[in-house]
Image (spheres, rainbow, N blue to C red):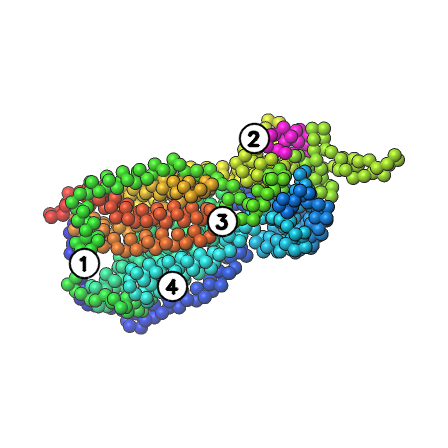
């Protein structure tokens, strides 16, 4: 089929719209978005009201660590999170911590007990065997802001101690406090860096100030309404929100909304050259960009919603949160931005206003500039280009064998300095490394000794205790039974040890605590938990093993299962979306294969980079998130390209359509890729390992897809295959006269 590009010298008289309607429609749309942004804007400072960084809250309800966590309240009061305070003697002190030092420490701990965030009894200082350190346990309320609580705790402990005594806050509360502090810059620093990067790129691309501001306004208004919606859904308990999810939402909405806006702006400017009427240009631009924007956004949403099948709620919660963001990004690009540009007209592009040129062809000057040279190269050597590009990508993908994505210790989640990490290292120098983060075992009351014996036989367990009604809350357990609490009794003949205390019983079960010999967040501690579960399956089948190490283990195992399920599912869903969009089977299959190859290269290069900079591995969710974002967003650019190629192929034949589509979309898609890469790079300003790794993978992958896959591999492969690329649609059949 062949048609002639449409060029209009004046508005279609049959489509004339009253002037009052031309003014009213954009005004109402702009006002509606302004009101929505005004309501949603203040919620940027309220996200912490509905967010949680408690890892057990994101585990599936059937996970063993989750079951144990749910039963802890029957043995202990409240939902307190323990902070381990480590006191270390002044460096080089031969006497270690003296009696006076320990007395001063206990005085400070009495002050700490009066803090609002403290929920429960504060233990006295427990000296180490070598006398060089002491530790104390401070329960912090689960409802407290851990960043503020640990800061207040640090300030209270920093005064009144003997000179030279070092103090560290570590343990579960310490690490959580570090993580909360790391996410503190999301509302300000992250947004500021992302918006500044986008603004600079847009100014360079358009060489205008007004148009970049209109595009940024579109992105920010979309984010305000997305955040407003997500906040209320989180408040009502429909979904979970964490600092990590919040950061990804911000970046994704800004990047996606800007990309969709760039596509619309390109079509609008193109139409302004063919009609003097801004309303007609708006209508045609919407008709030309509606389908690719809707298809691109729909593809991303479909990929994100596949995360709902994740066993980890941290993954499944991201799906709907990010999908809400994409919905508002599309809405803003298809309503607010057209309204703004309709109101501004050609003035939006000042000082480079597009001129009305009725003689201009839709493809412009086909062989000039960068994309003209690229298209001539593809016309001359298509097979050489796509094979060379594919081989280079495959070589990069080989690095994926070096990827270490089986999990990282909690102590490594925060980049840079970490008091909790340093405190854990000092703790391990003087106490069992797992002090303060025990393995919890919930066992039937009648199986107490047998359950304790399993713990005592495990090499990775240094000490065993049972939760009991004693001042410390526990009583030691040995192979001979529960030891006496050591309290004096007043019987004839002098003081003797009190009788062994009775364990606390809840629903017919007791709670054992095993102090780990290794750091609770280490691979060795996870292996200890795995070995214990295997042993209990034979000795005490009803026993449940939980705690910090068990949470890490269950999280990693669930994440690996998620990856195996969701990755192929995302590919199938995207393929099913592309087929009706392109009215073909072969083209979607090839597009998905090229995108997967691009993802493999991004992960391979990332693995080499991560190892080179000394990262301690990666979370199993990093490849999963990287895959979902890169495949869904990478397909976006192929959709932008191939929908235009199909449009041009209908008029000029497939091979010419490929070249014309490349020239028409090359500049705008490259700009969109730069914007998206810049926004994801902004995630690296948050000092969290997961976000830094995700930022590199997505940013590098987007640039790779923009400059290699979409610019060279896909066009050259499509040109080489020819009209068969559209099989089995009519475009794959014999061409009309003159259409190759």
Q: CA distance from mark 4 to mark 1?
A: 30 Å
- The residue beneath circle 4 is 217
First in sequence, mark 2 or 4: give its number: 4
In front here: 238 or 482? 482
First in sequence, mark 3 or 4: give its number: 4
In percent of width and height, residue 208 lies at: 30, 65
Side (left or right) of 526 relative to 632: right
Q: Classify residue 431 by image quadrant.
A: top right
First in sequence, mark 3 or 2: give its number: 3
Query: The C terminus lies in which quarter of the figure?
Result: top left
Q: Alpha-carbon neighbours of circle 3 within 10 Å: few (<14), some, or many (≥20)?
A: few
Residue furthest to the bottom: 20
Side (left or right) of 14 relative to 75: left
Highlighted magenta segment, given as a residue range: 443-462
In percent of width and height, residue 146 lies at: 58, 52
In percent of width and height, residue 66 lies at: 57, 41
> Which of the numbered marks, if any, corresponds to residue 169?
none
SS for dot 3: loop
Q: CA distance from mark 2 to mark 4?
A: 55 Å
SS for dot 2: helix
**Residue 296 is at least partly visible in this image:** yes
- The residue beneath circle 3 is 416
Residue located at (44% from left, 56% from top): 190
SS for dot 1: loop
Residue furthest to the right: 492
First in sequence, mark 1 or 2: give its number: 1
Which of the two marks, 3 or 2, is nearer to us in this view? 3
- The residue beneath circle 1 is 364
SS for dot 4: helix
Residue located at (88% from left, 34% from top): 493
């Amino acid at each position: 089929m062949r048609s002639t590009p449409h060029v209009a010298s004046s508005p279609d008289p049959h489509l004339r719209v009253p002037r009052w309607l031309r003014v009213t429609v954009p005004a109402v749309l702009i006002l509606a978005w302004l009101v929505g942004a005004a309501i949603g804007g203040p919620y940027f400072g309220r996200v912490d009201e509905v967010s949680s960084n408690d890892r057990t809250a994101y585990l599936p309800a059937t996970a063993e660590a989750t079951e144990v966590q749910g039963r802890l309240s029957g043995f202990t009061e409240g939902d307190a999170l323990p902070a381990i305070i480590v006191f270390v003697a002044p460096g080089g002190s031969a006497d270690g911590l003296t009696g006076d030092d320990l007395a001063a420490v206990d005085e400070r701990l009495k002050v700490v007990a009066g803090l609002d965030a403290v929920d429960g009894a504060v233990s006295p200082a427990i000296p180490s065997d070598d006398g060089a350190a002491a530790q104390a346990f401070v329960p912090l309320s689960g409802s407290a802001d851990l960043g503020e609580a640990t800061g207040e705790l640090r300030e209270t402990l920093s005064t009144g101690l003997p000179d030279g005594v070092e103090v560290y806050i570590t343990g579960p509360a310490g690490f959580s406090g570090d993580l909360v502090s790391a996410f503190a810059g999301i509302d300000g620093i992250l947004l500021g860096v992302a918006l500044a990067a986008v603004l600079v790129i847009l100014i360079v691309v358009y060489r205008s100030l007004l148009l970049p501001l209109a595009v940024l306004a579109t992105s920010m208004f979309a984010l305000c309404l997305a955040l407003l919606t997500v906040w209320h859904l989180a408040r009502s308990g429909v979904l979970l929100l964490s600092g990590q999810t919040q950061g990804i939402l911000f970046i994704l909405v800004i990047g996606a909304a800007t990309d969709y806006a760039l596509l619309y702006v390109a079509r609008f400017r193109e139409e302004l050259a063919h009609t003097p009427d801004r309303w007609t240009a708006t209508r045609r631009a919407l008709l030309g960009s509606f389908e690719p924007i809707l298809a691109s956004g729909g593809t991303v949403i479909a990929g994100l919603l596949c995360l709902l099948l994740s066993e980890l709620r941290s993954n499944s919660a991201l799906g709907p949160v990010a999908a809400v963001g994409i919905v508002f990004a599309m809405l803003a690009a298809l309503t607010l931005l057209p309204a703004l540009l309709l109101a501004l007209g050609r003035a939006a592009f000042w000082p480079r206003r597009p001129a009305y040129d009725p003689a201009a062809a839709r493809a412009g000057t086909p062989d000039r500039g960068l994309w003209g040279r690229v298209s001539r190269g593809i016309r001359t050597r298509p097979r050489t280009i796509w094979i060379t590009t594919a081989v280079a990508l495959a070589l990069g993908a080989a690095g994926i064998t070096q990827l270490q994505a089986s999990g990282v210790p909690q102590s490594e989640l925060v980049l840079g300095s970490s008091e909790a990490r340093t405190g854990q290292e000092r703790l391990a120098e003087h106490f069992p490394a797992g002090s303060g983060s025990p393995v919890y075992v919930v066992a039937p009351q009648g199986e107490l000794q047998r359950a304790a014996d399993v713990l005592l036989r495990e090499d990775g367990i240094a000490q065993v205790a049972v939760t009991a009604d004693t001042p410390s809350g526990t009583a030691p357990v040995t192979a001979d039974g529960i030891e006496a609490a050591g309290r004096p009794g007043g019987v004839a003949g002098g003081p003797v040890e009190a009788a062994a205390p009775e364990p606390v019983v809840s629903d017919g079960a007791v709670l054992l605590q095993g102090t780990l010999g290794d750091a609770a967040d280490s691979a060795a501690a996870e292996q200890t938990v795995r070995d214990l579960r295997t042993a209990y399956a034979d000795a005490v089948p009803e026993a449940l093993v939980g705690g910090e190490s068990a949470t890490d283990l269950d999280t990693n195992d669930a994440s690996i299962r998620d990856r195996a399920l969701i990755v192929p599912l995302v590919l199938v869903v995207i393929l099913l979306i592309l087929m009706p969009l392109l009215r073909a089977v072969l083209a979607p299959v090839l597009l998905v294969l090229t995108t997967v190859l691009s993802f493999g290269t991004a992960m391979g290069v990332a693995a080499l980079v991560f190892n080179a900079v000394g990262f301690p591995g990666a979370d199993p969710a990093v490849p999963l998130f990287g895959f979902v974002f890169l495949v869904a967003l990478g397909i976006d650019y192929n959709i932008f390209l191939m929908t235009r190629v199909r449009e041009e192929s209908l008029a000029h034949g497939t091979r010419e359509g490929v070249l014309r589509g490349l020239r028409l979309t090359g500049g705008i898609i490259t700009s969109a890729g730069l914007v998206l890469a810049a926004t994801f790079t902004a995630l690296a300003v948050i000092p969290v390992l997961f976000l830094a790794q995700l930022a590199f993978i997505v940013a590098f992958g987007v640039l790779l897809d923009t400059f290699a896959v979409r610019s060279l591999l896909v066009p050259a492969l499509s040109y080489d295959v020819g009209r068969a690329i559209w099989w089995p649609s009519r475009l794959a059949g014999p061409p009309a006269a003159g259409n190759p």
